[in-house]
Amino acid sequence: MSSWQQPTTMMRMKYQDWLSHANLTEGETVGTHDPHYYFRLIGCGETGPMGECDKGSSEYLFDELPFFQPKENLYMVDPLEQKGIHCRFGMNGVIAENHFDQSRNAIAVMGGERRYILAHPNQCSLLSLLPKGHPSARHSAIDWSDPDLETYPEFAQAEANEIVLQAGDVLYLPTNWFHFIISLNLNFQCNSRSGVTPDYFKALRKCGF
């Protein structure tokens, strides 16, 4: 881990400032190696220095997205375990590296398109996961945008599903499922988590989690 470097930088930015950067990618004036910005809005009140949730609640997000309110419905399986609302705005070319989250997740796209590549937890032995204790634990060491099959030959055997979410689509992501996300254009997504489904923990225990 001594050579590990944090792949992203956290900063505060106004929406209009982010949008001015994001609009540049629509005209393909921003290259692959130029800075890309991933805007995040958290519906849980104050945030700590690393963006974590603090006490309180940003009620307006729950008013705007009533289906994510902590009430039992199609999206909130366990409303008592609702973890707030996270909205993420992507610019063309932004990716979220492959990882898993230890909770149920309902993901709604409000505008634009996002490509999701999904893998069952039983594929974990083929994904070269960074171990517990690593700063990027739960993530794959493989660059899914350009996998090095000489270094990670087992990755060629991994099975995955692919879906492109468009405005109005909602994806249910079960506990511990792997997901790699690519922004295909300017897009807006909000998601909310509610508890866990224990069925998929056994598969990940075999991979050290």
Image: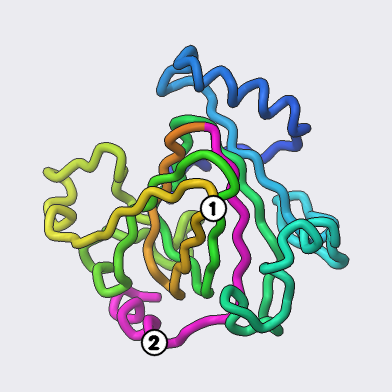
The residue closer to the viewer here, 91 or 102, is 91
Secondary structure state at the residue bearing disc 1: loop
Label 2 is placed on what type of residue? Asp
Q: In terms of image quadrants, where is residue 145?
A: top left
The quadrant in which the C terminus is found is bottom left
Q: Mark 2 points at which residue?
A: 199
Residue to which mark 1 is pinned: 168
Q: As shown in the figure, which amino acid type bears the numbered disc 1?
A: Gly
The residue carrying pointer 2 sits among few (fewer than 14), some (14 to 19) or many (20 or more) residues within 10 Å by Cα, namely few
Residue at position x 53%, y 81% in the image: 196
Between residue 26 and residue 42, name the one nearer to us: 26
**Relative depth, front residue between 138 and 19:** 19
- The extreme front residue here reads 168
Question: Residue 84 in magenta?
Answer: no
Residue sitting nearer the eye, 12 or 173: 173
Provide residue 91's location: percent of width, then percent of height.
54, 32
Q: Up-down: is 11 above or below 164?
A: above
Residue 169, position as x, y percentages in the image: 49, 56
Residue 194: x and y, percent?
Answer: 61, 76
Mark 1 or 2, nearer chain start: 1
Q: Report if residue 47 is visible in the image.
A: yes
**Res. 2 visible in picture:** no
Q: Position of residue 11 (x, y in %)?
A: 71, 37
Residue under the point 49% across and 15% down: 27
Residue range (magenta): 186-209
Tell me what residue is drawn at x 52 percent, y 74 percent.
Answer: 104
Is 204 colored magenta in this rendering?
yes
116 with respect to 155 (left or right): right
Left or right of 52? Residue 129 is left
Which residue lies at the image location 45% right of the left edge and 68% below the top edge?
173
